[in-house]
Image (spheres, helix red, strand yellow):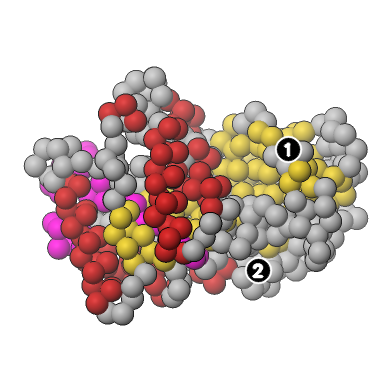
Amino acid sequence: MALHRINLTAVLSTLACSVSLTVACGRLGIGDGGAAGDGVTDGPDASRTDTDGAFGDGLEPHDGGKPTEPPQDPGPPAVRFIGRFDTRNAAGPTCAWPGCRIVANFDGTEVKARLDEHVESWMQGGPSEWDVMIDGALQPKLVLDLGAHDYTLASGLAPGAHRVELYKRSESQNGYTQFLGYDFSGGTLLPPPLPATRRIEFVGDSGPAGFGIEGVGQGPDCPGPDWSAHWQNFHKSMGARLSEMLNADLHGTIYSGKGLVRNIWRADPETMPVIYPRANPLDPSSAFDYSTFVPDVIILMMGGNDFALGQPTDNGPTPLPEFTDATRGLVATFRSRAPQAHVFLALSPSVRDESPPGNNGRTNVKTAFDTVAAERAAAGDPHVYSVAPPVAAESELTACNGHGTPAYHDRVAQQLAAMIQPKTGWQ
């Protein structure tokens, strides 16, 4: 299997990451992530790794996503990565956060990928699962095996130009994956998709994660761990749907069970403000280079876990002043990394005052979000908004452990789009 190797030695600019490997970075609807460097491939195709991305590189999708039009300025052949990748290992970038995308255009009849899957001893419900798309058409998902393996993604394709995409549908606590290259079996890597002109970051917990979305009708408790990769699918989540609706690249900075002050697992000290700066949420040393992806819109949808019944023993809800201060601090981080971004503090429709009784989760989260948005406006920052999509009906929360159905995620995505478009001017 002739893979193009990556050399991640040079830090790249926001829109140009260059490396070598049949990989290259991407532009497909989930943003870019991480730095990369120039290198020389071990095969006939030059390639580049870009850390920005979405789906149109001038090779406009046509007939199910197959590239048909040559781009005005395609650049050299490359694979594109979209999402937060840890790029410190020269052998290939690693994705832990959900929603990472690995996209390439190629001329050939076959494509394989070499992936190295890691599952830690404490993890349950792994390994990672990835969606595969060929020319825009969804293929059977990949359930990875531990360690490094070669996976055939498509064979017997018609001669000519095609597009391949890998999309990480599961969360980091179920496993993380190192990408070691695409192999086109004698085919040729083509210039990659260009970045979208719009960028969204969605920061959240299990509500927007697509947690349990494949388990509708299985429970309330789905067989095995409710949080297993088998039941997850970030590709169907409200953030993914929103990015499709608005034609934007997306970063899914999502981790189920996390809060701003207290996680659902109360003994876990790594809240979202702690892990937010990381390229890999599981690795404290993996600092994410914010300059590689500067969002136009940031959505924060969290807080339910701060006011939920804590596990394994409950120590009560987060005091409102502490939650407000944590929201204030995270918004300051957002503003420092993206001075012009529109920041939406979105009250989750699944958070309710009566669950658990007496914790007043919905009221407290909204109060904190309203307070921080008002403070930012008073300080001369009018682009921080407190928004509240309508509370979920019981019929919308029949996925694993009372989480949202596909219809719920679609509904919330549509409502968020309607809130975002007047502020940004996006049509």
> Which of the pair 20/391 is nearer the observer?
391
**Drawn side of residue 406 relative to residue 325, left or right:** right
Examine the rendered structure and indicate whether residue 192 appears above or below residue 148. below
Marking on residue 45: none
Kind of element beneath mark 1: loop
Examine the rendered structure and indicate whether residue 6 appears above or below residue 122. below
> Which of the pair 187/343 is nearer the observer?
343
Kind of element beneath mark 2: loop
For residue 411, say whether it is visible. Answer: yes
Q: Residue furthest bottom?
A: 380
> Which of the pair 182/8 is nearer the observer?
182
Residue occupied by mark 2: 15
Image location (x, y in percent) of residue 344: 36, 60
Question: Residue at image x 45%, y 38%?
Answer: 410
Q: Is residue 306 magenta?
A: yes
For residue 173, say whether it is visible. Answer: no
Q: Is residue 255 magenta?
A: no
Amino acid carrying label 2: it is: Leu
Q: Where does the N terminus fall, quadrant-wise?
A: top right
Amino acid carrying label 1: it is: Gly
Please provide the residue range marked out in magenta: 295-324
Question: Residue at image x 81%, y 64%?
Answer: 72
Which of the marked residues, 2 or 1, is nearer the chain's N terminus?
2
Examine the rendered structure and indicate whether residue 250 appears above or below residue 400. below
Marking on residue 64: 1
**Drawn side of residue 185 relative to residue 364, left or right:** right
Tally the marks.
Answer: 2
Please tell me how crowded label 2 is: few (under 14), some (14-19), or many (20+) other residues with Cα within 10 Å. some
Q: CA distance from mark 2 to mark 1?
A: 27 Å
**Drawn side of residue 244 relative to residue 313, left or right:** right
The answer to which quarter of the image holds residue 139 is top right
Image location (x, y in percent) of residue 322: 18, 62
